[in-house]
Amino acid sequence: MAPNVTVMGKALIDINGFQKWATGNLVDNRNRGIFAEWMVGEALGCIKPKAFRVEWDSFDLLYGDLKVEVKASGYSQTWNPHEATVPKFTISGGKWTWLTKLEAKNLDLRGVEHEKRRSGIWIKNNPPKRPADVYVFCLHKPLPATIANVANPSKWTFWVVATRTLDEVLGDQKTLGLKKLDSLAPRIPWNEIRAAVDDSQSV
């Protein structure tokens, strides 16, 4: 039974109905990207049962102490679903970075431009820098995209790249295509993401 908002024992609104209406179309580019974040979070086992996604965080997932950025693209787009587009991933740096509790404890903030917000301590990056420790790139392959094939992890391809590699090889480059991405990391299936993220920090 769908969870409802109730007043005086009377059901007023179907919350599942809202969720389906707002995010149920996984083919939509924004929803597909959010689904990719969740899918990677499930692969890493780092999404807590009562946690909610944060819209404007400086990275997407926290896996232990590792900050993970998830980037999604696909061949099929809502405006032209049957013809393949050229996938591109945005990898530009950010002006602000959120510190984990461990980072905030160990970092000397004297002389560092920062702000204390409700979500914690944020430091200003000048010049902008990539705030995550590792990137997981997600490519949805089928043409056309459908809700069913977006929801199927086997219809995606993944790459895991340490941020230090992006910085060393690409510098301040703002986008990344498949050819260059293939030169940075092997293509892996969904069930190998966790091992690849662990390995990315071992060098």
Image (cartoon, rainbow, N blue to C red):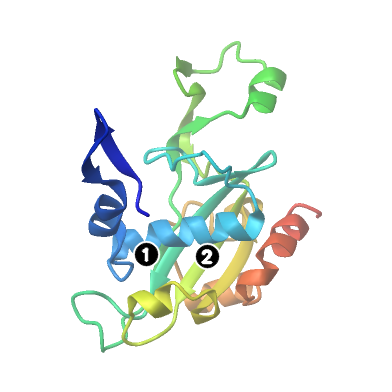
| Residue 188, above or below 14 | below
In this picture, is 78 found above or below 119? Answer: below
Q: Secondary structure at mark 1?
A: helix
- On the rendered structure, is 29 left or right of 57? left
- The amino acid on which the numbered mark 1 sits, given as a three-letter code, is Arg
Quarter of the image where one finds residue 104: top right
Residue 179 shows which numbered tag?
none
Residue beneath the point at 62% across and 64% down: 160
Question: Left or right: where does residue 126 sit relative to residue 21?
Answer: right
Residue 46 placed where, x, y %? 63, 47
* Label 2 CA crowd tier, 10 Å (few <14, some 14–19, many 20+): many
Q: Residue at x 58, y 49 (%)?
A: 68
Image x and y of residue 126, in percent: 46, 31
Residue 175 appears in the rendering: no
The answer to which of 155 and 18 lies nearer the viewer is 18
Classed neighbour count for the residue bearing mark 1: other residues with Cα under 10 Å, few (<14), some (14–19), many (≥20): many
How far separated are the C-alphas under marks 2 and 1?
13 Å
Q: Are marks 2 and 1 in contact (CB under 8 Å)?
A: no
Q: Quadrant of residue 76?
A: bottom left
**Which residue corresponds to mark 2?**
137
- Give how far across and how far down residue 83 sits, in percent: 26, 88
Point out which mark residue 32 bears.
Answer: 1
Comes first in the chain, label 2 or label 1: 1
